[in-house]
Amino acid sequence: MLELTENAQKELEAYFEGKDRGTIRIYLAPGGCSGPRLALALDEAGDDDATEEAGGFKFCINKNLLAEIKGAKIDLSPMGFMVEPENPLPDTGASGGCGGCCGGCGSH
């Protein structure tokens, strides 16, 4: 289900240094101009979640979301953590969020 890159694992280890390692949720976040994206947050697993360990960390994800994406690769980018789904994210009917190129994210 999960692949945690070495760079992402090192960043998580640095974050949790001296702290209890809580469960990390993978969730579908609104993405503004680029549409929805997968993101990470600290959260406890619930009854509707699947859990998995990777790189010494416990992750949880909603079972329905996992069924749609099949798995994810967690990596580190200059902008922070990047969570790439194995299968493309569900189509929300939005075509990129803004409705036009180079127009900013204001209303149109």
Image (cartoon, rainbow, N blue to C red):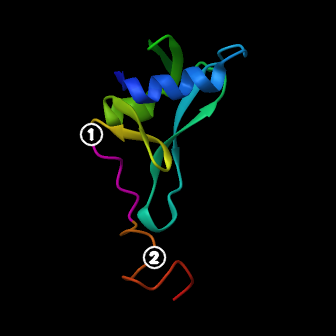
Which x, y percent locates residue 21? 65, 15
Q: Are marks 1 and 2 in contact (CB under 8 Å)?
A: no
Q: Dot 2: what SS?
A: loop
In three-dimensional space, the C-alpha distance between marks 1 and 2, rounded to whole angstroms, equals 24 Å
Is residue 32 placed above or below 42 in the rendered structure? below
Q: Secondary structure at mark 1?
A: loop
Report x, y in % for residue 55: 44, 14
Amino acid carrying label 2: it is Cys
Residue 87 is marked as 1
- Considering only vertical position in the picture, is 18 above or below 26? above
The residue carrying pointer 2 sits among few (fewer than 14), some (14 to 19) or many (20 or more) residues within 10 Å by Cα, namely some
Would residue 92 appear left or right of 56 to someone viewing this image? left
> Residue 82's spot in the image, x, y percent?
43, 42
Over which residues does the magenta segment extend? 87-93
Closer to the chain start, of discs 1 and 2, is: 1
- The answer to whether one can see residue 89 in this image is yes
The type of residue carrying mark 1 is Asn
Which quadrant of the structure image shows residue 106? bottom right
Residue at 31% x, 30% y is 70
Disc number placed over residue 98 in the picture, else none: 2
* Crowdedness near tag 1: few (<14), some (14–19) or many (≥20) residues, C-alpha within 10 Å: few
| Picture quarter with the N terminus | top left
Q: Main secondary structure of the magenta part?
A: loop
From the viewer's side, name the closer residue of 20 and 37: 20
Q: Residue drawn 41% across and 58% down? A: 92
Give the vertical position of 23 relative to 69 (above or below).
Answer: above
Outermost residue, left side: 87
Viewer can see residue 48: no
Q: Is residue 24 magenta?
A: no
Among the 4 quarters of the image, the one containing residue 103: bottom left
| Residue in the foreground of this view, choosing between 96 and 76 | 76
Q: Which mark is residue 42?
A: none
